[in-house]
Amino acid sequence: MKNTLKVQRAIHNLTQEDLAKRIGVSRQTINAMELSKYVPSTVLALKLARVFEQKVEDIFTLEEDD
Amino acid sequence: MKTRYLFPHKYKILGWILLVPSLVLGVLFILADTEVFVLDATVFALYDDGIFEAAKAFKLIENNISDELVAITAIVGGLLAAFSREKDEDEYISQIRLESLLWATYINYGFLLFSVVFIYGLAFYQVLLLNMLTLLLIFLIRFNFILYRSSKAAFA
């Protein structure tokens, strides 16, 4: 699964730390998601979508091998 | 995040305070092979197979409890240090936690299998003594290393 977190974060002018605080996770988690090393839970994906005021599908997209 | 089966975050530091000194003492006990300090007490023994005397069961016995104290402190400290919540414990950290525990279990039993095959005599008894804590220690090293590495990466 790929995501546009880094782009979205830049658009909203948030640091990893800011975003982590907004959705109540560790900075490590934001970083791991941006590096596609971690696939977030549905709850976390929905929280991210809410912060960015986007649909989940606009942030996360499936890849061939998913 | 709500977590199950973890201690509150504040016990983590207490865990380390108990673990580190008792580890140092424990290693001293094993290396020195003599009593580093003696603390005789009367204790209740479910079973005591005396080496130079008859075995006893359900009896009060005299025993130097220094090693018992060190073992209890190390185990309790180890559990608290390993299984207290991180300050910002979330789903990713929980995943690292579980993976580290699995990883530590494999390494620990690998180490034990190796010792079963290659270590003999009383030295094997010392391996078993160390084995009381190796699972927790390997877990602590791996878990904290990964956390540290991903926090470094997060700053970059």
Image (cartoon, coloured by chain):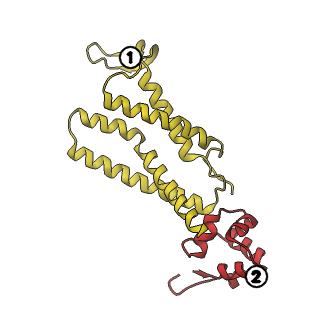
Horizontal and vertical percent position of residue B109: 35, 50
In the picture, which quadrant includes the N terminus of chain B?
A: bottom right
Which amino acid, mark 1? Ala
Q: Residues within 10 Å of mark 2 (few under 14, many from 20)?
A: few
Display colour for chain B:
yellow
Horizontal and vertical percent position of residue B141: 46, 51
Name the residue nearer the viewer: B58 or B67. B67
Task: Give the image quarter of residue A58.
Answer: bottom right
Residue at image coords 49%, 57%? B145
- Numbered tag placed on residue A54 in the rendering: 2
Q: CA distance from mark 2 to mark 1?
A: 70 Å
Q: Is residue A64 left or right of residue A23?
A: left
The secondary element bearing badge 2 is classed as: loop
Residue at image coords 65%, 79%? A6
Which amino acid, mark 2? Gln
Residue at image coords 58%, 62%? B151
Residue at image coords 42%, 31%? B25
Q: Residues within 10 Å of mark 1 (few under 14, many from 20)?
A: few
Question: Which numbered disc, 2 or 1, marks the residue closer to the eye?
Answer: 2
Q: Chain of mark 1?
A: B
Q: Is residue A32 left or right of residue B45?
A: right
Horizontal and vertical percent position of residue B40: 43, 14
Name the residue nearer the viewer: A12 or B77. A12
Query: With respect to residue B67, does B136 lie above or below?
Result: below
Residue designated by label 1: B57
In the picture, which quadrant includes the C terminus of chain B?
A: bottom right
Display colour for chain A:
red
